[in-house]
Image (tube, helix red, strand yellow):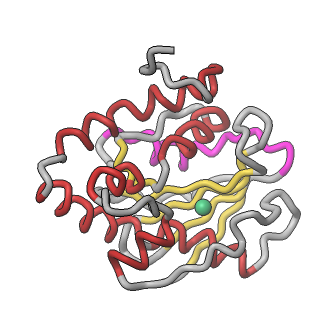
Amino acid sequence: MAVHFHEEDLPAGVLTGTGALAVDTETMGLATLRDRLCVVQIADGSGDEHLVRFGPGSRYEAPNLKAVLADPAREKIYHFARFDLAAIHHYLGVMAGPVFCTKIASKLVRTYTDRHGLKNLVEELLGESISKQQQSSDWGGPVISDAQRDYAASDVRYLHRLKDELTVRLEREGRTHLAQACFAFLPARALLDVAGWAEHDIFSHM
Ligand code: MN
């Protein structure tokens, strides 16, 4: 088990297997059009995490990473996919589906709580603890610290196991079909965000 750090793209031949991939992003902030994509984290569930860092002025070419993210045969597991899909689509130009979102799955089955953060899920469902201390750090600097690398990797480390547990609970509560419909809509939801409907619920009457 190791964290692998790459600049500007995945090396050829990395993560070329089959099966679901856990994906997360770190950016300069929450406004996708303003705040550039700095890191894409990706893991295949084998215990290794890959971090791809994009520097200031990056052209985001990354053909190997884009091919893996755009592969329609491989499910991508996110925690709050809506944000990551928008950032990946805006900066890398690919829609990184099909999607499983652990936050949406959690909202559909953990109706007894409003705590749907990744840290909460990892603690309750897996009995592990992760630190969110580096969440608000500067991902755009020349050097990514060891603490930042560990944090970025931990954000994709547990997503396969969370998906397995949440899938059982969705089935138990009879909400698998609802989850699948939400996941299928997520690419459109992400495109609506960057097209100007971020703060607007298009399903509301108003
Ligand atoms: Mn993250």
Q: Is residue 200 at all visible to an observer of this figure?
A: yes
- Specify the farthest residue to the top: 206
Give the number of marks. Answer: 0
Residue 76 seen by the camera: no
Residue 66 in the magenta stretch? The answer is yes
Query: In the rendered structure, which segment of residues is drawn in magenta?
Result: 56-72
| 73 lies left or right of 10 | left
Residue toward you, 84 or 113: 113
Q: Quadrant of residue 188?
A: top left
Is residue 135 shown left or right of residue 157?
A: right
Ligand 1, by image quadrant, is bottom right
Q: Nearer the viewer, residue 73 or 113?
A: 113
Q: What residue is drawn where x is 67% and y is 40%?
A: 61
Q: Is residue 85 magenta?
A: no
Q: Quick check: 184 above or below 203? A: below
Residue for point 48% across, 46% down: 81
Left or right, residue 206 beside residue 45: right
Q: Position of residue 1 (x, y in %)?
A: 46, 84
Q: Which residue is at 66% across, 64% downward?
A: 6
- Residue 139 point in image, percent of width and height: 78, 60
Q: Compare residues 85 and 120 and report the one nearer the observer.
A: 120
Residue at 62%, 37% in the rendered image = 92
x and y percent of residue 182 in the render?
Answer: 33, 37
